[in-house]
Amino acid sequence: MDLIVFILSFVVILVGCELFTNGVEWVGRRFKLSEGAVGSVLAAVGTALPETIVPLIAILTIGGHAGEEIGVGAILGAPFMLTTLALFVCGLSVLMFQRRRGTKTLHVNGTLIRRDLKFFLLAYGLAAVAALAPPEYGLFKWVLGFCLVPLYIVYTIYTMKTGETVGEDGEEMKNLYLDNVVRKCTGKEGKPVECPADVNVADLKKTLHAAEPSTLLIIVQVLASLGLIILGANMFVSQIKDIATFLGINPLILSLIIAPIATELPEKFNSMLWIREKKDTFAIGNITGAMVFQSCIPVTIGILLTGWHLDITGRIGQLQAAAIAIALLSGIILYLESSHKEIKMSGLMIGGLLYLAFIGLVLLFI
């Protein structure tokens, strides 16, 4: 393992996430999108790219039984990490920034979060049924797999149409980072915006709109930040694989536990940054939206390209089944927590306890 590359991968992911959260908020404001559309769809899909690419590479390039094991493990491991470790990181973030935030709880739109979790529990439940079905039920699995894509389309359409529009309540937003760079390079930095003497609402809106970054700059920043996130995640995964090889860890354990830690870093960092800025619905929606995406699109890929079967008579299959059960249990707990106006820090910390329980199972089984 190259320590410099290992540290550099963290830096690349952090920079990419900071640019991405800033850019995707401006996308929501520019196109008048809802909170759910920004947090649960755009941010979730964007940051889910690394963990979607990993199983595809494993299945298509490594191939064989090992490639299939890594691919299936990575697909099942992503929702597990999101429902345990990612939520735990959110709890830690609330603790870290409680003085800045002035509260020990998350204030979220419970309706949006519970909607995400309903779709997740349904989709991941179907994925579990398909995985536990006997190998000869291939047609049944394919039917379930093809149902998940329309389910995600319905979820996306519904999410895009509901919720408050980003920035409609007058909340302050950071300037677009790329726009700041352009202003510095062109010498326009720091020039005050001139308002008419007899200001009215219409004139003020036009003045503020003129001061906002261009749509092209917003899109360029979002695409560039996604590139950094994918690059950093791939760098991190390669270093983690070197560690696993050195320690002689089973490929499936690597894909189920170690690889998702790296590929889920963008969601964790994004949510941490949003919690710092008191944008709690974005923070949790980024995770729950990724849970829905991961339980639909990658699962469909897994069902179509692999045998998608858990042999629960073996230890590895039992660990996979435990990961599925823990992910569903954590999803249910978060659903119950989201029924209140606030999500307590303790409700998020439970994810860490569930993750430690699973690690205990792994140590017991191997």
Image: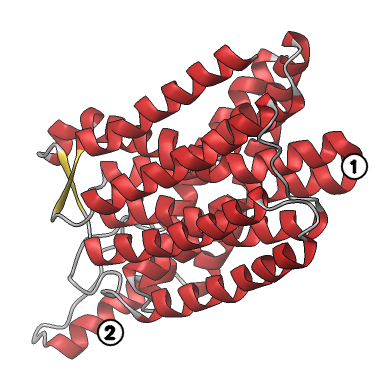
Q: Residue at x 76, y 10 (%)?
A: 246
Q: Residues within 10 Å of mark 1 (few under 14, many from 20)?
A: some
Q: Is residue 318 above or below residue 222?
A: above
Say which residue label 1 marks. Answer: 63
**Where residue 257 sits in the image (x, y, percent)?**
59, 29
**The furthest residue to the top:** 247
Q: Is residue 241 left or right of residue 183?
A: right
Indicate the secondary structure of the residue bearing disc 2.
Answer: helix
Per the image, the residue denoted by label 2 is 206
Q: Mark 1 to mark 2: distance in Å?
A: 57 Å
- Identity of the residue drawn at 71% across and 66% down: 140
Q: Quadrant of residue 109?
A: bottom left
Which dot marks residue 123? none
Q: Is residue 181 visible?
A: no
Location of residue 47 in the rendering, given as x and y in whole percent from the top left corner: 55, 51
Tell me if I can see residue 296 in this picture. Answer: yes
Which is nearer the eye, 128 or 295?
128
